[in-house]
Amino acid sequence: MTSGAPQKTHPRDRLLDTAARLFYAHGIHTVGVEQLVTEAGVTRATFYRHFAGKEGLVLAYLRQRDARVRRDVAAVRAAHQGRAALLALMALAGDGVRREGFRGCGFLNAAAEHPDPGHPVRRYVAEHRRWYLGVLRDVADEAGHPDPEGLARTLAVLRDGAMAGGYLDRGGDIAGTLRSATERLLDA
């Protein structure tokens, strides 16, 4: 548990919080059930009462990340439209790479650890990505871009690159580079 933070009392919440911290920091495959239950302060029986197994916990972790991204995207869409919304969506990624402990995109990391496209984790990541591409496409269309699908795919690739670059190049201005690249695309 992180010191100084109030301990959540519900074992499921503690397991999810612990999984989110450990999976993101160390990778899904390197974290075992024993470490999860020990750090969450629960028993193995409690773990299995809430999750069918580690895969169930991984999917719950990804659902939790997905819900957070969807809330952030909804807030951007409620506050901005068109070009401003596209810039704000890319700024979300740019702001994310500046966070202390940033280790790339949790969805890309999970996909890298689960290369089989039929695996439930990989299918969930693909579902999240389809949703995100759809949002970018819809906002590009609302902005009047002549090729909303192409712009959405290009922005997704820029975001993916910013996520990787933000992890690998901690001293660079990834957020600024992402913003200027997005502006150039929108001005083209």
Image (cartoon, rainbow, N blue to C red):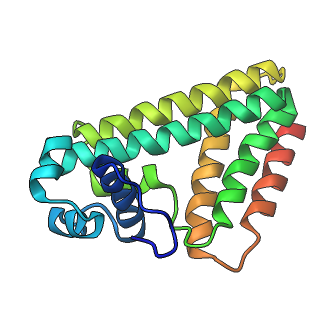
- x and y percentages locating residue 183 in the rendered image: 86, 46
| View extreme (left): residue | 45
Q: Nearer the viewer, residue 109 or 41?
A: 41
Q: Look at 61% across and 72% down and name the residue there.
A: 100
Q: Is residue 159 visible?
A: yes
Closer to us: 93 or 55: 55
**What count of labels does the image hold?**
0
Could you tell me residue 32's position as x and y percent?
Answer: 18, 66
How far across and down, in percent of the image, does residue 128 sit? 46, 35
- Residue 14: where, in percent of width, then height? 34, 55
At x 29%, y 57%, the residue is 113
| Residue with the most extreme bottom position | 171
Q: Is residue 44 left or right of residue 121?
A: left
Q: Quadrant of residue 81?
A: top right
Q: Quadrant of the C terminus?
A: top right
The quadrant in which residue 43 appears is: bottom left
Residue at the spot 66% in from the left edge and 35% down from the top edge? 73
- Left or right relative to 73: residue 105: left
Q: Nearer the viewer, residue 187 or 84?
A: 84
Front in this rendered view, residue 66 or 34: 34
Residue under the image location 84 percent in, 55 percent down: 180
Is residue 188 visible in the rendered image? The answer is no
- Asked if residue 186 is positioned above or below residue 160 in the image, the reply reads above
Left or right of 148 in this view: 26: left
Quadrant, the N terminus: bottom left
